[in-house]
Amino acid sequence: MDESQRGDLLSLGTRREFAAGQVLLHQGESSTHVFVLVEGHVKILSESGSGRTILLAVRSRGDLVGELAGMDGSTRMARVAAIGAIAARLLPFDEFEGFLHRHPAAFRVVNGSVAAKLRSATDKIIDFSSQEVPVRVARALLRVLADHGRPVAGGVSIGIPLTQPELAAIVAASEPAVHKALAELRKHEVVSVGYRSYVVRDLPGLRRFAELPGEIPATP
């Protein structure tokens, strides 16, 4: 969005601040408001019928959260929780919709964002159905790196705190299988693993583990 569009959007609604772990949206609720993330990161989580918590995605500054419920009137598909302290603009859906009518170019940007989320979900389904756990783990790390990575000494951090159980939830695998995959990445000095942290030491090597040929994308 250009500066005038961003200014108009960020003038709407009210600013809200959330502490680490606080929930912005609850799965199954019937609200339709949306959040524009201004600072920090949130996790998108879904509770399965068996009671398992699945980490669907991580969103960060500039992302829109909760737009689907307003678009189709359905209940919330997932829970949204803060990772660390965050700030966001809470917009009633009618205000958000009015903004889109005033700025057709911004409407196209939002459509593109929704399409990108759908593509990402489709990619994950393909990975889960056709790839072994080590490949899925490598691809998951690459996805997070592309969205949130930041340079650090000796490599690129994935940029957000992520536990091994959460990584297992992302790739739909058991924790022991994910632990084994990470051990293999560490053995080849591709990734170093700390407490809720991952640093990619060898990006081409990680892409090889992910079985993704081609050029290495630029990192932040």
Image: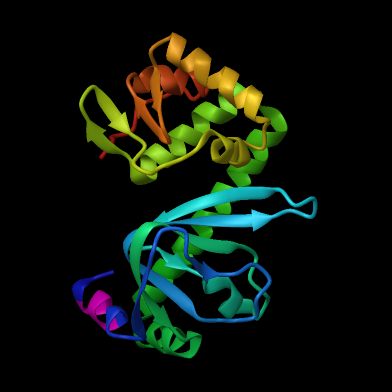
Residue sitting nearer the eye, 93 or 166: 166
Tell me where the magenta segment starts and ends, as one range.
4-8
Which quadrant: the N terminus?
Answer: bottom left
Residue sitting nearer the eye, 209 or 44: 44
Q: Which colour scheme is used?
A: rainbow
Report the residue at 64% width, 48% height from top: 54
Residue 61 visible somewhere in the drawing: no
Residue 99 position (above or below residue 146): below
Which quadrant: the C terminus?
Answer: top left
Report the residue at 59% width, 26% height from top: 178
Residue 111 position (above or below residue 168): below
Q: Position of residue 109 (x, y in %)?
A: 39, 67
Q: Where is residue 177 in the image (x, y as percent from the top left)?
A: 65, 23
Report the residue at 58% width, 48% height from top: 55
Q: Where is residue 123 in the image (x, y as percent from the top left)?
A: 59, 42
As for residue 7 lying within the magenta part, the answer is yes
Magenta residues, dominant SS class: helix
Q: Count every numbered label the image shows and give the total.
A: 0
Residue 77 falls left or right of residue 84: right
As for residue 111 lying within the magenta part, the answer is no
Residue 122 falls left or right of residue 208: right
- Residue that protrudes farthest toward the top in the picture: 187
Residue 150 position (above or below residue 55): above
Residue 5 visible somewhere in the drawing: yes
Report the residue at 47% width, 59% height from top: 21
Q: Position of residue 27 (x, y in %)?
A: 64, 67
Q: Can you tell which quarter of the image residue 78 is in? A: bottom right
